[in-house]
Amino acid sequence: MYYDKVVLMKKIIKNELVLLFLIILVFILLRSVYFTEHLNFSADQAEHSTDVLKYYREHKIPLIGNPVNSIVYQGHFLYQGPGYYYMLFPFLLVTNFDPISSSYLFMLFCALMVIPLYYGMKLLIDRRAALIIVIIYSFLPYYLNYTRFHWNPNYLLSLLPLLILIMGLYNKYKSQKLFFLISIFLGFLFQFHYQFILIILGIAVYYFFIKKVSPFLLIHFFSGLAIGVLPLLLFELRHDFYNIQTLILLITHRDQVSSAGSITTPHYYLSLSFMLLVAVLAIIRNKLPKGRTFFYASSVLAVLLFAWAAILNFQKPATAFWSYAPNWRYTETEKVYQIIHSKNLKDYNVADLTYYNTYASTIKYLLKRDNVAINYEDYYDNKYLFVKKASNTELYDTLSYEVATFKPAKLLQTWKINDDYNLYLLERL
């Protein structure tokens, strides 16, 4: 019986399409269990979605993206490209700008990227390396966490399989057109996060110093990069080279530069770690086990990573992934929104005192999506104020001007959202 099972598994592994189908199914399963409870749709996701919604309704095509870079000097940021917005838009559009459905659709997109990743790695290195990286991409909790919610580093990771596929095709056909396409795609991916410059440099070293392709291809390389970042170039030309001037300021005043990020922030290493893994597999390709040994080794790797991911994900989380507020998930956000929307008030605003983003971006995104017409920026003249706050603290025990200046006022109503948080409705007197 055991022998028959082993033979069956070997046949499945030899049948690539069946194997990829099974991996994709498990990929989706791991992320679907308690998907909404795990979902991170907080300030960043709401602000980016609000921008995309605004551009869509105004029929505009953005030339820059927000998030801006986390490094800042006296209010000067490096703006990133709009590539993330271009990718985010179709996911929002086909789901009527719903956070849960659009995030789930993005997760399915990430699942389908297993196919180009496998065949790209197979062409670039070999079949063994392809299977290993597909297993790691699909089951490693680190990549699992970042392939089920909207964010520019996540989208960058999700598009790397297409880059690897193009590189694999170039490795097979040595076509200048494919090399040009690689360069264009590198430029496009650079729009998502400036960390990608390290990968661009690594790939340039790989082709021009290791593979020693023709120096003539430098023309293809730089012209392709320029096409890939064309929106940013147009923005620079229209705004007196703002990003270049800002970069000079950041360099010349580096001692005074502040950053919202940290070297230990996990998402900084998403794409870097992934491409490093590709490089390592290329280096050790001749040392990878073969035949039956590889079959057992890859099976053990898949089982171990699946078990690790299942332990972390097959239990209902009390807090959404990377939530700044403990015991808070998107389901609570939706509950707050439904309460506010059901009151049918006109002259009000919303403040969130459980998060550094007191502006309540997530709630306001949902209101804007549903065309609720209020003055979203005014906290001085609004008659009513909804306040989300921890239930074990005093309502006015805050330095947030949105609430601290809302006086004199009376408390009209209180809603218990969960064991730790309440929603309050205040009326200005």
Image (spheres, rainbow, N blue to C red):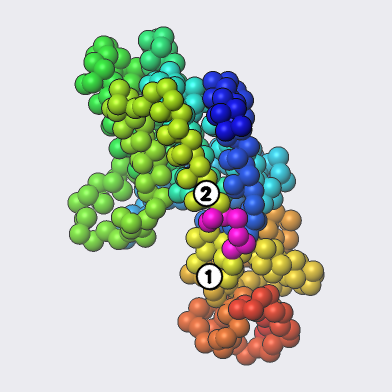
Say which mark, if any, is on residue 79: none
Identify residue type, mark 1. Ala
Classify the position of the C terminus by image quarter. Answer: bottom right
User: Residue 42 in the image: x percent, y percent?
Assistant: 56, 60
For image coordinates 69% across by 60% down, the residue present is 367
Callout 2 secondary element: helix
Figure check: 287 above or below 372: above
User: Residue 318 in the image: x percent, y percent?
Assistant: 59, 67
**Mark closest to the chain's N terminus, 1 or 2:** 2
Q: Between 120 and 357, which is closer to the camera in this rendering?
A: 120
Callout 1 secondary element: loop
Classify the position of the N terminus by image quarter. Answer: top right
For image coordinates 49% across by 39% down, the residue present is 302
Figure check: 34 above or below 326: above
Residue 250 shown left or right of residue 381 in the figure: left
Identify residue type, mark 2. Ala
Residue 58 image-quadrant placement: top right
| Residue, far front | 1
Residue 146 seen in the figure: no
Disc 2: which residue: 307
Q: Dot 1, crowdedness within 10 Å: few (<14), some or many (≥20)?
A: some
Q: Is residue 104 rendered magenta in the image?
A: no
- Span shown in magenta: 311-317
Residue 342 seen in the figure: yes
Disc 1: which residue: 325
